[in-house]
Image (cartoon, grey):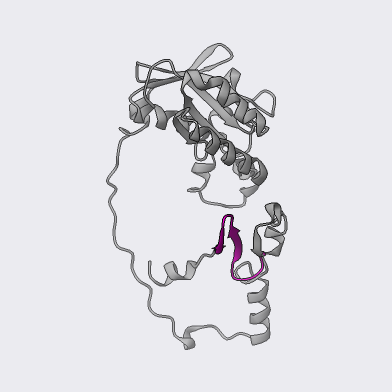
């Protein structure tokens, strides 16, 4: 972001308590208190995210955007700090102007709520009306929640009080870096067939089929409408989902998601 006194604009869905601290939860250990971590899980809304994507692309084509950042990990905090630090600017946010869907949210919750359906943007002032019209057309929130400053400070105002005033560069691209000591992991000895405990083949097969690695993922993808816009050539359930590329009769995109944890276990 470049320029002082520029509007900082909140775009997309309203802020809720879901996703609070999700970035730190990803590095945490899970135990019997797993239910206590439920609020840190984001509540996805693919339709709103699609509308946000289209609105952002339309706005970017107009030349109105100076800087833009998603509110994924660390939410408002990270998006504001990264834009300000990269542009050598301070940023002041007024949380009372942030669209919310829950009452009595604390400043902590509002700053650390994470979701994929929101963006924070530094906008050219003369483009404000045009930008707002685009986002209202797509049914999304558009709110000026702050401004850029020239003091390299990150200020947060909540209910008239200044609840945070921190150096923005130290939170951004000049954050401390640590060179932690490390040792090379010991490779486990190769597993031979004779090392495996004796087991009933039928029971072993049932356990494998009932485990999450081999069971059906239908319950996941059937929760989403895979026929929107009529571009689906091959529906989920096979090795990949395939969608056509509009305007290119001979092109298509195939999508697949997979994970192989045993690779890391075999060779850390």
Establish if 245 lies above or below 7: below
Query: At 65% from the left edge and 46% from the top edge, which residue is drawn?
Result: 46
Q: Quadrant of residue 87?
A: top left
Query: At 58% from the left edge and 36% from the top edge, which residue is drawn?
Result: 55
Q: Estimate the x, y position of residue 131 in percent, counting from the top left.
A: 56, 26
The stretch drawn in magenta includes residue 16: no
Report the residue that reaches farthest toward the bottom.
194
Looking at the image, residue 56 sits to the left or right of residue 3; the answer is: right
Establish if 76 lies above or below 185: above
Query: At 65% from the left edge and 27% from the top edge, which residue is drawn?
Result: 100
Q: Is residue 74 visible?
A: yes
Q: Is residue 256 visible?
A: no
Q: Estimate the x, y position of residue 23 in percent, counting from the top left.
A: 50, 42
Report the residue that reaches farthest toward the top.
160
Q: Which part of the image, by quadrant, shows the N terminus?
A: top left
Q: From the viewer's side, name the closer residue of 187 and 169.
A: 169
| Residue bounds of the magenta highlight | 235-251
Q: Estimate the x, y position of residue 191 in percent, counting from the top left.
A: 43, 81
Q: Quadrant of residue 225?
A: bottom right
């Amino acid at each position: 972001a470049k320029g002082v006194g520029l509007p900082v604009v909140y775009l997309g869905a309203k802020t809720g308590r879901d996703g609070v601290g999700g970035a730190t939860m990803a590095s945490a250990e899970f135990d019997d208190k797993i239910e206590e971590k439920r609020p840190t899980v984001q509540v996805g809304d693919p339709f709103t995210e699609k509308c946000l994507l289209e609105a952002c692309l339309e706005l970017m084509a107009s030349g109105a955007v100076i800087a833009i950042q998603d509110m994924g990990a660390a939410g408002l905090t990270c998006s504001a700090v990264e834009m300000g630090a990269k542009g050598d600017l301070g940023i002041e946010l007024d949380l009372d102007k942030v669209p919310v869907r829950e009452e009595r949210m604390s400043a902590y919750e509002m700053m650390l709520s994470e979701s994929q359906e929101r963006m924070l943007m530094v906008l050219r002032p003369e483009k404000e009306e045009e930008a707002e019209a685009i986002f209202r057309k797509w049914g999304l929130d558009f709110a000026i929640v702050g401004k850029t400053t020239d003091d390299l400070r990150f200020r947060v105002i909540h209910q008239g009080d200044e609840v945070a005033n921190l150096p923005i560069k130290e939170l951004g691209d000049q954050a401390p870096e640590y060179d932690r000591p490390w040792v090379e992991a010991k490779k486990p000895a190769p597993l031979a067939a004779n090392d495996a405990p004796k087991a009933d083949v039928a029971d072993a097969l049932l356990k494998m089929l009932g485990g999450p690695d081999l069971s059906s993922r239908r319950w996941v993808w059937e929760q989403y409408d895979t026929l929107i816009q009529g571009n689906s050539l091959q529906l989920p359930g096979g090795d990949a989902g395939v969608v056509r590329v509009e305007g290119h009769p001979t092109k298509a995109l195939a999508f697949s998601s997979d994970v192989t944890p045993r690779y890391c276990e075999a060779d850390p």
